[in-house]
Image (cartoon, grey):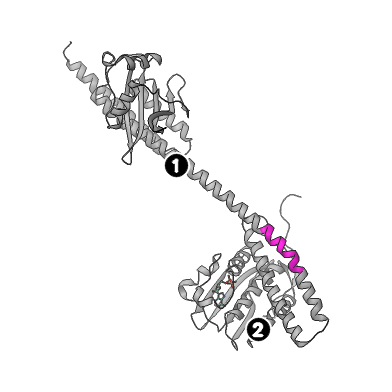
Amino acid sequence: MRELTKNDTADAAGQRAAIVNALNKAIEKLCSHAEETFGEVITDALRTIADAMNVNRIVFYRHVEVDGEDRLKQTYRWDKAINGLTEKSLDFLPNNQAIAGWLKTLRQNVSVNQQLCDWSSDELEFMNQFGIKSVFMAPIFTHGKFWGCVIFQDHINERFFSEDYAELMRSAAFLFVNAIIRAEMERETITALFEAQEANCAKSEFLSRMSHEILTPMNVIMGMTHILKMSGGSDETKKYLEEIDAASRYLLRLINDLLDISGKNNSAFTIASSVFDFNKIFREILKDVSCDVMKKRQTLNFGIDPSIPMLLFGDKKRLAQVITNLLTNASKFTPENGKIHFSAYVLSKDNETITLQIEITDNGIGIPKEKQNEIFSAFDLVDVSLTSKYSGAGLGLPISKLIVEMMGGKIWVDSEHGKGSKFTFTCKLHKRPPAVTGNS
Ligand code: ADP
């Protein structure tokens, strides 16, 4: 045997430095794969390591249990000849004595690394079958569990990997497996997210279809109730019809809210524009809510700024929807004989647009400070114990917020628990038909 010379030591130190350098480069590559795909990054990092270690194949085997037996299944393979990473899903290492011996060693967190002359005949058979001259197997443990191993193969030279090499190969193997696990987890997260989004869309579609189905008979019920109310009858019958009418109007609003909320994430939720008379719209809203107000013997005062132009352009139905919702809530959450005030005035204007500010004030139950932001999120009721005597689905305010924001405005509440609330919103309307944009 030849004695180690100074040159040999210098060579070994140089090689070690080259491998450490390659490992650093690989880490850098794996940590910054912002623009390239993960496949490209890991292939590049694997090539850097393989070149530094002078191996021509790096294979990843995952540990699996098949019929109660421990097996190693090939998951990825990098080949110098093609400089590519292949994803495998079926290749198992043979279930023979040689492999069982290696698996036992690896599971004890010990690498498999020996010279060709030390291989058993079983092991040699395996090596010859794949044309392997030298091999190093690094065990991988993640979170204290045996994950599998990474096998570095040299198909050209017979050699034994020194302790220095072995240590660096183990580090590299660990680094690669972690990068692969992270990429798989990212892939799984994206798939799960996609599935959740699909399920959400399906749910919205179902909700929308069902709401449409309920809408048709609902309109019939409302129409027939109206006809019956017009055709006279005893006071008792009129009272019952009034109840049916109020319940139907509530149900209709709920169905429309459900349609809005299910269409919130798609094109079904839109803002239209047509000419309207603000005062006329307000009178129609008053007709709609006066029933509730009168029933509770509440006072409803209003003040409308006379400088609001007679005719405005915007979505009158959506604007009416927000005002109706706020007035209905004001009546609902204010006890009998309470007071409600409505006011509308011009906040600002320019040549084309006019911004209105609308305020609805009541002296009802009020809203605790900590809940005042939450009521604008879908399905938030302030406190079931507080509001249980008032029915509600918690959809009106989130939808109002959506509408107001689509109309270029804001909505907020000032309230004192037990004293009352003031809901304010702004919205931008047009003085003349807004210009049509896009290609025509
Ligand atoms: P709904 O009225 O159908 O429950 P909303 O989204 O319109 O749904 O209102 C959400 C919640 O905000 C209500 O359940 C209630 O707790 C609270 N709220 C809304 N308006 C008022 C108000 N004027 N006074 C007190 N609480 C209110």
The picture quadrant where one finds residue 119 is top left
Q: Which residues are magenta?
A: 208-219
For the question of whether residue 311 can be seen, the reply is yes
Q: Amino acid at mark 1?
A: Met
Residue drawn where x is 33% and y is 41% of the image = 143
- Farthest residue, direction right: 231
Mark 2, Cα crowd under 10 Å, few <14 / some 14-19 / many 20+, is many
Tell me the element at label 1. helix
What is the C-alpha distance between the residues marked 2 and 1?
57 Å
Residue on which disc 1 sits: 185
Q: Position of residue 117 (x, y in %)?
A: 26, 13
- Farthest residue, direction left: 3
Q: Position of residue 389 (x, y in %)?
A: 56, 78
Residue on which disc 2 sits: 293
- For residue 57, the mark is none
* Magenta highlight on residue 309: no
Residue drawn where x is 29% and y is 24% of the image = 112
Q: Position of residue 169 (x, y in %)?
A: 31, 28
- Farthest residue, direction front: 67
Residue drawn where x is 30% and y is 26% of the image = 19
Drawn side of residue 104 relative to residue 185, left or right: left
Question: Ligand 1 is found in which quarter of the picture?
Answer: bottom right
Residue drawn where x is 36% and y is 25% of the image = 151
Q: Amino acid at mark 2?
A: Val
In the image, is residue 355 above or below residue 66? below
Along the line of sight, which residue is nearer the eye, 6 or 87?
Answer: 87
Tell me the element at label 2. helix
Along the line of sight, which residue is nearer the eye, 423 or 116?
Answer: 116
